[in-house]
Image (cartoon, rainbow, N blue to C red):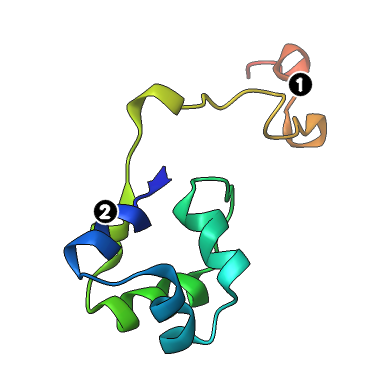
Amino acid sequence: MQIQLKKVLEEKHMNRYELAAKTGLSYPGITKIYDGKTKRISLDTIEILCRALDCTPNDLLVFDNGNICSVSSDILPHDESNKKDTSKISEP
């Protein structure tokens, strides 16, 4: 996912200083989002931005097909305790 704040700000004819004043978010925080250096963003922040920019999350967030991660044991821990040992099950 990418946050396209720069594009939305340009469409709204607003700069980062104005957005910071309107939202109460810090200018450095907005600049990190603007420059694409933010890896995580809270739902509260998305809501604040959307209200200030009169847009929806769909306007701010873009799915980036190039950075799709797959579910693997590196991402989600593998829990052996949930596995059943079927080798010991006998049939009636």
- Residue 38 lies, in percent from the top left, at 57, 51
In the image, taking residue 68 as reference, residue 28 lies left or right, namely right
Say which of 47 and 19 sits in front: 19
Number of other residues with Cα within 10 Å of mark 2, as a class: few under 14, some 14 to 19, many 20 or more: few
Q: Along the polypeptide, which appears first: circle 1 or circle 2?
A: 2
Taking the spot 80% from the left edge, 29% from the top edge, the residue there is: 80
* Residue on which the image places disc 2: 7
Which quarter of the rendering shows the N terminus?
Answer: top left
Say which of 86 and 70 sits in front: 70
Give the answer, above or below, for where 77 lies relative to 8: above
User: Closer to the observer: label 1 or label 2?
Assistant: 2
Q: SS class of the residue under badge 2?
A: helix
Residue type (three-letter) at the residue carrying disc 2: Lys
For residue 90, what is the image quadrant? top right
Q: SS class of the residue under badge 1?
A: loop
- Residue 8 lies, in percent from the top left, at 26, 61
Taking the spot 17% from the left edge, 62% from the top edge, the residue there is: 11
Say which of 8 and 70 sits in front: 8
Label 1 and label 2: CA atoms lie apart by 54 Å
Taking the spot 31% from the left edge, 58% from the top edge, the residue there is: 60
* Residue on which the image places disc 1: 85
For residue 64, what is the image quadrant? top left
For residue 59, what is the image quadrant? bottom left
